[in-house]
Amino acid sequence: MAKLWVVGDYAWDVLIRTNAELLAGGDTFGEVNLAPGGSAANSAVWAQRCGLPTAFVGKVGRDRLGDLAAEELEREGVEGWLITSEAHATGSVAVWIDHRGQRSMVSGKGADHYLLPSELPRAALENAPHIHVSGWSFFANPPRSAVREAVQLVKRAGGTASFDPASFQLIEQVGVDRFVRFTADLGFDLLFPNADEGRVLSGETDPEKAVAGLSERYPGARIVLKLDAQGVRVQTEGAASAHVPPVESRQVDATGAGDAFAGAFLSRWLNGVDPLDASRFAAGVSAWVIERSGARPEPDGRLRRRIEPQAGEDR
């Protein structure tokens, strides 16, 4: 039985990497590739890769990309609950990765944006120990009402919930107070903002103050603030927090690193590992991800050695 249920977006990333700065109206050489993505699906796959039995609920088109999504989840060992749509194509995202490894995204409105409450596997969710959702599902409705209902089903049945705010720019577009109204009443147990999302939601640039501000916005949630090259700031007791140092890495592509962090963290935390130790493990996984292209690069021997001994101990 799945210990983690993830509800939200599955999309295919069109990865566009430039070898030099792209000037307005200019041209340059680079790489263009298609890779599986979607913030929620990324976290589900990484949790499963890290040894945690995981299920994913999302919506795809009745098309070849939707078929590939089902095949990919099965290959990864994720229990897929995919709703298929005749009216909308499987989601796609253009991901531009610049010569420094920073990414910018333009998301199309695919089937993942049209998940409805009536399409949820309600009985399964009522038995879910933990649910994880992404901010991408809260920026429009649908799918906001469906994902809110999914979290409420799990929480009412006694499960726990976690949340990644996903995009500081879209939070600002929606409006910070409005976004908090959509999310803070759901009783999240864990929050995974990055530095920019933490700044926008708390109004604070200092990480310690941001953690304190976020804990006021989301009472009862443990804040795990991802600081990229500065490591992680983890809430301990009350407004106090502790720093987890970064894992040294060479950034190639930041796409999906935060999703990988969430999945890796949950794979340990849901097995009783201390949040600081779970953060150290997750930081190592996400550091490996940013050294490669795409949100779900194929694990190599180095990553397997990092994951497998700990996964065996936690089972």
Image (spheres, helix red, strand yellow):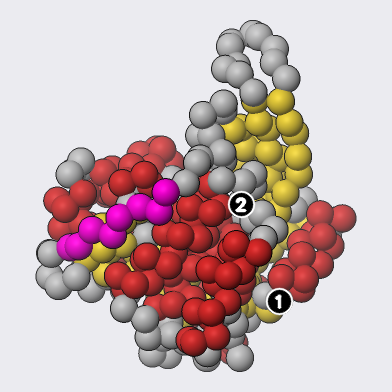
Whether residue 1 is situated above or below residue 241 in the rendered picture: below
Q: Quadrant of residue 109?
A: top right
Whether residue 150 is situated above or below residue 156 in the rendered picture: above
Along the line of sight, which residue is nearer the eye, 263 or 64? 263
Tell me the amino acid under the disc marked 2: Ala
Q: Secondary structure at mark 2?
A: loop
Labelled disc at residue 259: none
Mark 1: few, some, or many residues within 10 Å (few <14, many ≥20)? some
Measured as percent of width and height from the top left, residue 257 is found at 51, 52
Identify the magenta region. 241-248
Reading the image, the residue beneath label 1 is 77
Horizontally, is 38 left or right of 151 in the view? right
Measured as percent of width and height from the top left, residue 196 is found at 33, 42
| Residue at the (68%, 45%) spot, across then down | 13
Measured as percent of width and height from the top left, residue 140 is found at 50, 50
Examine the rendering and report whether any part of residue 134 can be seen. Answer: no
Reading the image, the residue beneath label 2 is 295
Tell me the amino acid under the disc marked 1: Gly
* Mark 2 vs mark 1, CA separation in Å: 17 Å
Whether residue 97 is situated above or below residue 233 in the rendered picture: above
